[in-house]
Image (cartoon, helix red, strand yellow):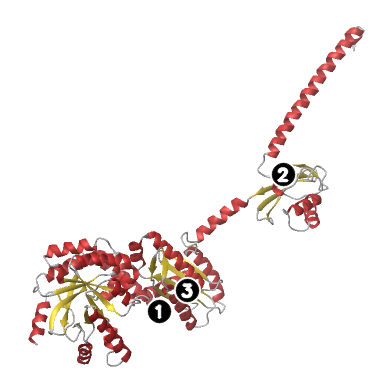
Amino acid sequence: MTDAVCLGPEQLEELVAARVAQRTAQLQAHEQDLHNQTILFNAALNHMSQGLVMFDGQGRVVICNQRYLDMYGLTPAQVHPGSTLVEVLRHRLASGSFAGDPEAYAREILGRIPGARTSKRIVELPDGRTIAISNQPTPAAGWVATHEDITERRRAEEQIAHMARHDALTNLPNRARLREWLAHALSHAHRGRPLAMLHLDLDHFMTLNDSLGHPIGDELLRAVGDRLRECVPDNDIVARLGADEFAVVVTNIESVDDCVSVATRITDAIRVPFEIAGHTILVDLSIGISVAPDDGTEADALIKNADLALSRAKADGRGLFRFFESGMDARMQSRRKLELALKTALPREEFELFYQPIINLSTNQITSFEAVLRWHHPERGLILPGEFVFIAEEIGLISAIGEWVVNQACKEAASWPDELKVAINLSPSHLVRPNIPALISGALAAARLPPHRLEIEVTEAVLLQATEPALATLRKLREMGVRIALDDFGTGYSSLSYLRTFPFDKLKVDRSFIKDLGEDDQSFAIIEAIVMLAHALNVTTTAEGVETEAQLAHVRRLGFTEMQGFLVSRPVPGAKPMPVRRAFAAG
């Protein structure tokens, strides 16, 4: 004031004007800062990935960002400062982004906000979206609500969870999901609701997969999964355990007969030919069955016991189903020991070929010997092929063993008289391998055995599993001069079609028909028709399994070309075929 008193009117006016100008400049700068901050705030608010809306203590909108409007199909005019929560919800109800009672929902929120902590909830919208909502109370008794669309994240999480419990190829539940499902189902089995676990394995799938290719093999597995799903109710489960193994668990059973019905229904369904990529594929399967609670009250025990029963089914000949029995675990331990010993059998030279003579019924002379494999086990002694060949197939040894058989048979036959032939059986896994013609050609050359002295025997089952690749291999062998015989004739599905497709040199009628000769008129009629057909096609016929003089008489009367069986001789070691031949000729 002292300075002001000393100032004149003009000076005082200038001072006031300067201070007003300064203050005005400060206010303008502050307003610009506020404006800039508002722009930044609005930009940040409207570029949030979450929808945001702030309400005061009376549930009126204070501020709302664009993301919130976009999420629910609203306009700024519908959600403006002063709009009530109920009004906003009604607009959402009209846009289809809210389901429920707006008034009830608003009362719930307004009653919970005062003094509450942050609350979160997950809401499923009518259009299928999933929204995560977080309500954060404010000091002024209102709250800030953030809305995040987590639909894709939730789907990704669900997909990951699904993949962890389902097979990628067939989309069936996997082993982990099966265990979870069984654990829940077994809790009910304890209370008097039994269930059956069926462990399924496709017979000779690996051979088919190698011959037709993995894409067709994968498509077959998917088709098998589809058929299995059709065989069981929706409340039961079908799972893929890996490779060509599946599991079926059925809960609505009351007796063993119910389990047999299920196994039969599944087997019949899978045996119907599959049409895949121009190929007609016939599949069979083996099944092991365990029943809870008698065979296990825990998932792992039930799965293990069904697996043991499956091993028994495969050991008994495949294409069968077997129930779990006490003692199977001990047999499985024995099987594992056999596997380990089998892996060293070939390098330890424990295999030997035995030979069974085949007799020409017109001359009563031995014309050939069929080579059969024997294993001299270091502890168990002589083991027949039925006990170990299927194991060799499963553990991948059959190819090496088969190669040894081919070379050994050709080598030993080369020392026989020139008129004698040797017959060798080829397994399914051999026949579809492209190197088989080269292998046989090499074995013949190394032994200096003419190709016409070698006969390759194949079963109908071999042709059923991979017709085209198998027939292609057989054609190459026949072009080399090797004779081809169809073994176990009459036990397959479409024998006559094979006679038309491939010119076999010989048909060997299965021993199951020979056994019933004289007792079953139907078997006699079937064999008579087979022999007549073979004669018309100029194909040699061999009767297998002739064990009695009565059977031999029937075989002669029917007009068979050849016979073999215990009546003449059991298979003998490789060093004894010639003494057997001389003894037969002398007799």
Q: Residues within 10 Å of mark 3 (few under 14, many from 20)?
A: many
Q: Which residue is mark 3?
A: 197
SS for tag 3? strand
Give x and y (percent) for residue 484.
Answer: 22, 72
Instruction: Locate the N terminus and report the quarter of the image it occupies.
Output: top right
Q: Left or right: 365 with respect to 151?
A: left
Of residues 432 and 61, which is closer to you in this image? 432
Mark 2 and mark 3 lie on one chain; the one further toward the N terminus is: 2
Give x and y (percent) for residue 13.
Answer: 89, 11
Q: Which residue is mark 1?
A: 326
Q: The disc labelled 2 sits on which kind of residue? A: Leu
Q: The disc labelled 1 sits on which kind of residue? A: Ser
Q: Which residue is mark 2?
A: 52
Mark 1 and mark 2 lie on one chain; the one further toward the N terminus is: 2
Give x and y (percent) for residue 45.
Answer: 70, 39
Give x and y (percent) for residue 523.
Answer: 31, 88
Q: Left or right: 165 with respect to 532?
A: right
170 to 578, vertically: above or below? above
Separation (CA) of disc 1 from disc 2: 66 Å
